[in-house]
Amino acid sequence: MRAALLLTVMLAGCTTTAAPRPANLASYRCDRVPMFKVSFEADHAMLDTGSGTPIRLEQQPAASGFHYASPTHSIRGKDEQLLYTVGRMSPITCVPFRARR
């Protein structure tokens, strides 16, 4: 009994908590704007255009694919294509950026 208790205490000291998963980070290349990065979180995305503070985009309902928006920016997409909108501009088509090896 004493050995079982000691073993339980020793094993409890060995347990670890799972580290938080890193966000899904993606880079996109667009036809009218410089490359930008998007960090997809559980209920929002962080848009980093490289020109200052990243912009938080809240997840929006989407029939298929994904849709995130702030009052001034939005991204929506499905598969390999993403549409990026700033203000009242027409949407900009973007595709994932993959560095050459």
Image (cartoon, grey):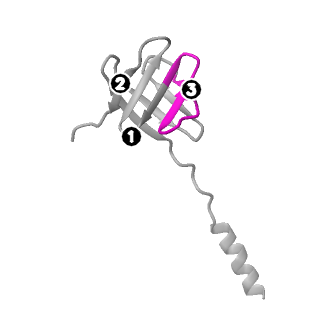
Q: CA distance from mark 1 to mark 2?
A: 13 Å
Q: Report the side of 16 relative to 37 (left or right).
A: right
Q: Which disc, if any, is residue 93?
A: 2
Earlier in the chain: of badge 1 and badge 2, it is 1
Q: Which residue is mark 3?
A: 56
Q: Which image quarter holds the C terminus?
A: top left
The x, y position of residue 20, in whole percent, is 57, 49
Residue type at tag 2: Thr
Determine which quarter of the picture holds residue 91. top left
The residue positioned farthest toward the front in the image shown: 63
- Of residue 46 and residue 17, the one placed in the foreground of this image is 46
Q: Residues within 10 Å of mark 3 (few under 14, many from 20)?
A: some
Q: Which residue is mark 1?
A: 79
Earlier in the chain: of badge 3 and badge 2, it is 3
Earlier in the chain: of badge 1 and badge 3, it is 3
Check residue 58 for magenta coloring. yes
Q: CA distance from mark 3 to mark 2?
A: 20 Å
Q: Secondary structure at mark 1?
A: loop
Residue type at tag 3: Arg
Q: Is residue 99 above or below residue 49?
A: below
